[in-house]
Image: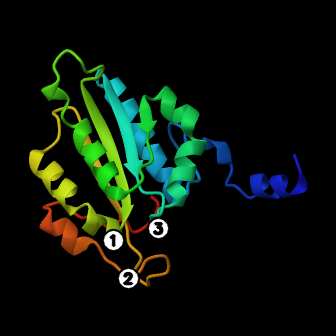
Amino acid sequence: MGHRDEVVANSNPPGVALGDKYDKAQGTALLSGAQALVRLLLNQAERDRASDLNTGGFVSGYRGSPLSGFDQTLWSAGKQLAASGVHFQPAINEDLAATACWGTQQLVLFPGEATVEGVFAMWYGKGPGVDRSGDALKHGNGAGTSAKGGVLVLAGDDHTAKSSTFGHQSEQALVAAFIPVLYPSNVQ
C-alpha cells in the first residue's frame, strides 16, 4: 500500500473501510452519491431475496446526464450488481432508456417467458432528457408497475447550463407526468 492509500485508509472512522460501500450489512459506510444509488439497487435485491421474491434489477440512462459518473460507478460495481441480478444497459438517449425501463414492468404480458417475477428498475437522465422522454415517462407511469417491480426516475438537472444548451429543472415535467418528486438533502 502506497503512502497516499495509507493516509486515506487511516483517515476513516474506526471500523470503516472504503471497501464497505457495497458489502457492509450494518454500521457506517463511506459512499458518494452515485455509490449510494448502486447500494440502493443492491439493497433492493437483498430485500427481495429476504422476502422470497424472485426479482431482477435493471438500470438504464443517458451517459451525457449530469449523473454521467453514475455509469462509471455502475460499471465498477459490475460484479456485485451481476451477483445480485441487476443488469445495467446504458442507452443512446433518454427515450430508449425510459422505454426500456417501462418495458421491464410489462412481464405479465408474456406469461411463461419471464425468468423473474418482477423487475425493479432505475432510469437516469438530464433535464432536457426528461423533456425529450416525456411520452415514455408519462405513459410508463400511467401504465403502472408490475406487482413485484417498480421504477425509480433520477433526473440530473443542470441549473446553470454547464453541460446543457439550457439551464433546466425537471420538477414541472415530472409533475405533469404524475411522477412523485423527492429531494434528497444529502447522501444519507
In this figure, which residue is indicated by the disc labeled 2? Answer: 166
Above or below, 129 against 115 in this view is: below
Earlier residue among tags 2 and 1:
1
User: Residue 58's quadrant in the figure?
Assistant: top left
Q: CA distance from mark 2 to mark 3?
A: 13 Å
Please state which of residues 165 and 7 is positioned toward the viewer in this rendering: 165
Across and down, in percent, residue 51 comes to: 29, 25
| Residue depicted at x 49% and y 81% | 162
Q: Earlier in the sequence, mark 1 or mark 3?
A: 3
Circle 3 SS class: loop
In front: 78, or 40? 78
Q: Do tag 2 and tag 1 residues touch (Cβ < 8 Å)?
A: yes
Q: Secondary structure at mark 2?
A: loop
Q: Earlier in the sequence, mark 2 or mark 3?
A: 3
Residue type indicated by callout 3: Pro
Q: Residues within 10 Å of mark 2 (few under 14, many from 20)?
A: few
Towards the viewer: 98 or 76: 98
Mark number displayed over residue 128: 1
Residue that lies at the very extreme toward the left in this rendered image: 142
Scheme by which the image is coloured = rainbow
**Mark number, residue 70:** none
Check disc 1 and give the amino acid type: Pro
The residue identified by callout 3 is: 66
SS for callout 1: helix
x and y percentages locating residue 2 in the rendered image: 89, 51
Left or right of 179: which side holds 13? Answer: right
Point 82% across, 58% down: residue? 7
